[in-house]
Amino acid sequence: MKFTLAFITLFITHHCSAQPRTTYKRYEQPIIVINENTIQYGAQVFRLEIADSVKTMFTKGLLYPELFCYKMDMTDSSGNRNKVPPFFACDTLSIANVVEIKSNHNYKTRRFKLWFWRQKFMNPTEYEFEITNQGAPRGVDLKTFIEQAWLTELRFITIII
């Protein structure tokens, strides 16, 4: 019983607390679409197993690898390149199960969840994110909404076991 109450309290606190919104920058470097399921951002690659309607979020730079991995300095003070331990490598990442979380509260904001895999990890992690398009008219289709949208929230939710 105590566990159930603690879980419910944590769930309500996590999902219902007012959190400040941040507008994340879009990816500013060239984005290369290698094929319909692979997109390259510099030296990092996303492998996507998602619907075509949400791929625009990745090709327009709303979501990109540096949002999910810490950017590690690859050179030391003398300019020598350091080797990143394989466990922390972020060169090839996978995204799947991007699902819109339906909500009627604001037509200028859309919420989603996704599963994120990194190499050497057995289980995916689940993230929730929100994109906002202040100029979106009511009832606009998803692809049009994404074109002028900005990422305004991204948060880790859990590890899928």
Image (spheres, grey):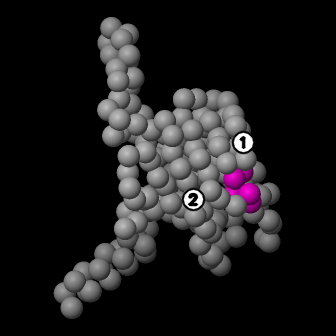
Task: Please provide percent x and percent y for residue 5.
Answer: 26, 86
The N terminus: image quadrant: bottom left
The residue that mark 1 highlights is 35
Q: Secondary structure at mark 2?
A: strand
Residue furthest left in the image: 2
Q: Is residue 75 above or below residue 47?
A: above
**Toward which corner of the image does residue 10 lie, by quadrant?**
bottom left
Closer to the camera in the image, 126 or 67: 126
Magenta stretch, overall SS: helix
Q: Amino acid at mark 2?
A: Ala
Task: Please provide percent x and percent y for residue 84.
Answer: 35, 29
Q: Is residue 37 above or below residue 86?
A: below
Q: Which mark is residue 138?
A: none
> Does residue 25 appear in this view?
no
Q: Secondary structure at mark 1?
A: strand
Residue at 37% from the left image edge and 68% from the top image edge: 161
The residue that mark 2 highlights is 96
Q: Amino acid at mark 1?
A: Asn
Q: Give neighbour class at mark 2: few <14, some 14-19, many 20+ (Cα, 10 Å).
A: some
Closer to the camera in the image, 66 or 121: 121
Closer to the camera in the image, 60 or 136: 60
Label 2, label 1: how far apart the Cα atoms are: 16 Å
Q: Is residue 16 above or below residue 46?
A: below
**Toward which corner of the image does residue 60 lie, by quadrant?**
top right
Residue at 44% from the left image edge and 47% from the top image edge: 118
129 sits to left or right of 51: left
Q: Is residue 18 above or below residue 154?
A: below
Q: Which residues are magenta?
A: 52-56
Residue furthest bottom in the image: 1
Residue at 51% from the left image edge and 40% from the top image edge: 92
Magenta stretch: includes residue 144: no
